Image (tube, coloured by chain):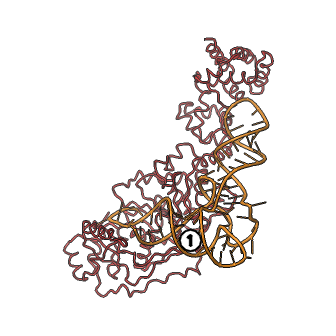
Amino acid sequence: MQSVCAVIRDPTPLSPTATPNALPYPPRPEPDTWSPTVTQDVRVRFAPSPTGHLHIGGARTAIYNWAFARHHGGAFVLRIDDTDPERSTTENTQAILRALRWLGLDWDEGPEVGGDFGPYFQTQRSESYADALEHLGSNGHAYPCFCTPEELDAMREVARTRGGFSGYDRTCRDIPVEDARSRVDAGESHVWRVKVPADRGDIVIEDAVRGRVSWPADVMDDFILVRTDGTPTYNFATVVDDWKMGITHIIRGDDHLSNTPRQIVVYEALEAPQPVFAHMSLIFGADGKRLSKRHGATSVEAYRDEGYLPEALLNYLSLLGWSIDDKTTLFDRETLVREFHIERISKNPGVWDPDKLDWMNGVYIREMSAEQLLERVTPLLEDAGLISAGEADERRDWLLEMVSLVSERIKRLDEVVPKVGFLFRSSVEIEESARVKVLEKEGAEAALAKAKDVLAGVEPFESGAIEDALRAIPERINVKPKLVFQSVRVAVTGSMVSPPLFESLALLGKDEAVRRIGSAIALTSG
RNA sequence: GGCCCGUUCGUCUAGAGGCCUAGGACACCGCCCUCUCAAGGCGGAGGCACGGGUUCGAACCCCGUACGGGCUACCA
């Protein structure tokens, strides 16, 4: 990132006449008179850092911002906070955009769509930060600090053993402006710190989710705005961007609540209007810790790959920390937009519940038509080598029937392939436990022989006729119905658990069905 | 350590002083249906963290305690 200091050095960075504490701050809104959810000119943003994939926590933040913007007819801005050059990659950025689109979240401004407030990558906004720092330098709200990291560490150590306040001790705050300037000009390494006004009282915000939150003034430290290398810190860049982009509501994770007073100080120093803040709680794992890799998949694309539907993930994520009312749990995108109110965001953290997601995904799968399901499942069948590229169209009717046999038996798309594999392979491998428990049973061989015999005569080979034929067997050879069905099931599918038997046989076709039963008979007598 | 936030069935939540004998959903258990597995139907068990106030009355208001989380970086 380009240096900000180079820009501010020239035009009198430190104005001796500035009297920061006397500067009038923009009036803050009266908490009791303003509504946290203004309906006009709403502009919100989602600002992921492309240091990894889109995390489900980030996805939920994006969903809430998107829903809020859509509900109010405002703008949803996507900004890429790529200030960490070590870990930010364009691949990650692309993956994040892909994941957002997969979830069905569209943005009005940002990468690939542009907008009037760009650029939408922080690495391209250096000028903006430079301008802002120049402004703060000249009005006395920021000052250069020459303390070395080692000195700061030592200082912190002392403060910590003493207990209480452990922030910067403001050593450089009182360096005469002229001295500071000449040291900067001489190239002495330095950072820029914000000068928290001495008479700044407690910092209070009216959070749209948490209500009034205040911080004692004396804990505010003169934190760093611009690093030695000239790059802005998060709390500075964010404020500058949100301000310049005209963001009106900041809906973000609880982990940023403690950053808010720092950002308020920057807003005030910048004399920028303050947005409404809304801090939602984080998502935890079952152990009550912040959701992370060790809790399983955490990226949106991982869920996509595991066969979750975007509609279901969106629905589930929306409900984790927000609700419409006391009953509604299943709803579509339009309902989300229509019913979304910041006030209904929950204050307490939510625990990620894979079971509920699975259930919900199953509901969405069951609600799909066979056509829709087949469309989503086709790539998986192809990837598994069950069908070739052109086959999906040729065998469409057959595939539609197949898909409807499993649709109410799966919770995830990727469960289809293992469940229907027996319909595609040229031979079945019979599970050992199934062989022992079913095929070795007394009467199994006779049942299979009879089934083979009877099925050979079924014409046309359709589920109804197949069922009639098989149901007649138990009485004729005097065995329990279950023995017949399970024997045939194991013979044909290789497993004791399968899609409905008669329909499966029909899909398989007479020849193959009879052949498999024949092979199974060989197994029993062997 | 300091500052901040949070705490209703195992989980997500409804609840904004009397509508609460605390409602819904997932998960769990039982029964029904049934060719297996599902799906579906019916039923069950299960909760206001604790202690003090305020009030005729508290899950809801106040204070404290406990527990959990966040921030306290030249990370975001």
For chain B, what colour was chosen? orange
Q: Nearer the viewer, residue A364 or A287?
A: A287
Chain under disc 1? A
Q: Position of residue A365 (x, y in %)?
A: 64, 44
Left of A172 or right of it: where is A421?
right
Residue A121 lies, with reference to residue A499, above or below; the image says below
- Residue identifier under label 1: A208
Query: Residue A70's image quarter?
Result: bottom right
- The residue located at (62%, 66%) in the rendering is A344
Q: Looking at the picture, which amino acid does disc 1 mark?
A: Ala
Query: Residue A83's image quarter?
Result: bottom left
Residue A119 seen from this side:
no
Q: Position of residue A33 (x, y in %)?
A: 59, 81
Residue A27 lies, with reference to residue A436, above or below; the image says below
Give the position of the N terminus of chain A as an image quadrant.
bottom left
Residue A195 seen from this side:
yes
For chain A, what colour was chosen? red
Left of A222 or right of it: where is A264?
right
Q: Position of residue A66 (x, y in %)?
A: 56, 62
